[in-house]
Each structure stands twice: as C-alpha cells, then as structure tokens.
Image (tube, helix red, strand yellow):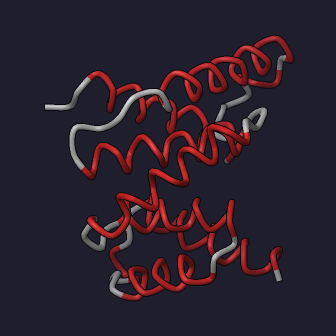
Amino acid sequence: METKLITKAKELRRVAERLAYFQDDGEYSYIDKYKEVLSWIYRACRELIRFHGENDEEEAEICLSVLIGYSTTVRNAKNIRRAIDRAYMVLPHLVPSLLKCQLLVYCYVEVRNQKLLDQAKQIMRTWNDSQLSEEEIRMKELLQNMEFYFY
C-alpha cells in the first residue's frame, strides 16, 4: 500500500507533468488557475523535499517528483541541490527501471553529467519498442529533445 508521502509525490508529478506537457484540457488557460497551479506545485516541492522515503524506491520517487515540480515552476536552487544529492545517494541502489531512468534523466537536466545520460540510455535500450508504456515513450521523447536542444 502506498504511503501518504508517496501519494503526495505522485500527485505532484501528475500535476507538474500535465502543466509541462500541456495536458490541461484548457483548464490553465485562465491566468488565475495557472498561477494557482504553479503556487501549488511550488509549495508541494518545498514540503516534499523535507521528507525521506522509507526505502530506495520511495526516496527516488520523492527526488524525481521534486525535480519535475521545480522544472515547471519557480526554481529553488537549494532544494534542487538537495534533491540531486539525495538522488545520487539512492541511484546506485535502484534496479534498472523506468523510475531509475526518469531520475537519471531529470538529474542530467540539472547537472549535465554525461554518465547519467549514458546510464539512462542503457536502460532504454532494454525496453521493447513495440510495447512501450506512455511514460516510457515520453521519456524517450524527452531524451531526444534534450539531445537536440542541449547540443
């Protein structure tokens, strides 16, 4: 069963990704609603970074949610650094998975460490392209866009 902390982390990710990928169905076209959502994301990031997961996967989920959240709203360098430092501690303990790949990619966005990107690509090479989940497809597209814009 999911803890309240992980439920909050996943809700933060869902809202931030809806905003980042324009999946709002016109909901955010009103400036007041848009500002309200940005404020909620910022507050959720600040709150979530204060907690630690009960295991490596929960810790990774928290770090990932905070990094995604701050990528869509006002950045807080101190909390981003905290999330990255914690991610670096947990990454070696995660099995190759979508969660690990996502965390590697979002850490790479912040620090541009090529080793992170190489590890993410290695995980992606194990995926069966004909049976990718929506999140795996999004991760591959994000990686392609990053490579295009960062180089």
Task: Give percent across and percent down for residue 96.
Answer: 30, 73
Q: Residue at x 55, y 54 (%)?
A: 84
Q: Nearer the viewer, residue 6 or 112?
A: 112
Q: Residue at x 27, y 51 (%)?
A: 57
* Relative height, residue 145 to residue 127 (above, below): above
Where 151 falls versus 53 (above or below)?
below
Picture residue at 78% right of the left edge, 32% below the top: 74
Splitting the image into 4 quarters, where does residue 7 fall? top left
In the rendered view, does 69 fall on the left or right side of 48? right
Observer-nearest of 52 and 66: 52
What is the x, y in percent for residue 61? Answer: 38, 45
User: Horizontal placement of 32 versus 134: left or right?
Assistant: right
Residue 106 horizontal/vertical position (percent): 58, 59
Tell me how many marks there are.
0
Nearest the camera: 7 or 77? 77
Residue lying at the far left of the rendered structure? 1
Relative vertical location of residue 82 with respect to residue 117 in this rendering, above or below: above
x, y percent for residue 43: 62, 19
Q: Is 108 placed left or right of 10 in the picture?
A: right
Q: Residue at x 73, y 42 (%)?
A: 77
Q: Is residue 82 left or right of residue 132?
A: right
Residue 68 appears in which quarter of the rendering? top right
Q: Quadrant of the C terminus?
A: bottom right
Residue found at the far right of this picture: 31
State which quarter of the image contains the N terminus: top left
